[in-house]
Amino acid sequence: RIYEFTAYGFGPYTVGTGYGYGSQKTAGVKDEVSTFEIGGTYEMGPGVNLMAGYYYIDFDSDDADLRNEANSFMIGTALSF
């Protein structure tokens, strides 16, 4: 398994990217999964953050019925107090 994530903050902004990979072989079938993500936050004020992100997942398998991929988007607000 491999998973790498990096983030950079500047002022009220934080941006980050991540990548993951894993593989497994059982009963002669090899499965692989790859993930990619990118996102960011903006601190509007104390305890109030806006967030957005994009996620991509690719699942590959020797078994064609199991192959799949997904795209996901997220937008939200985080409140902490």
Image (cartoon, rainbow, N blue to C red):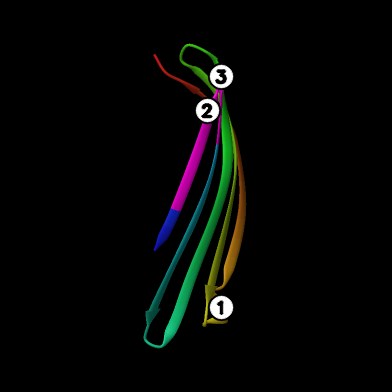
Looking at the rendered image, the disc whose residue lies closer to the viewer, 3 or 1, is 3
Q: Residues within 10 Å of mark 3 (few under 14, many from 20)?
A: few
Q: Is residue 62 magenta?
A: no
Q: Which residue is mark 1?
A: 65
- Residue visible at 54% across and 72% down? 60
Q: Which residue is mark 2?
A: 9
User: 33 above or below 39?
Assistant: below
Q: Amino acid at mark 2?
A: Gly
Q: Secondary structure at mark 1?
A: helix
Q: Secondary structure at mark 3?
A: loop
- Residue visible at 60% across and 63% down? 69
Q: Which residue is mark 3?
A: 11
Q: Amino acid at mark 3?
A: Gly
| Residue 45 rendering spot, x and y as whole percentages | 53, 11
Quadrant position of the N terminus in the picture: bottom left
Report the disc number at residue 80. none
- Residue visible at 47% across and 46% down? 5
Q: Which residues are magenta?
A: 4-15
Q: How far apart in space, not on screen, are marks 3 and 1 (Cα)?
A: 47 Å
Query: CB atoms at circles 2 and 3 under 8 Å apart?
Result: yes
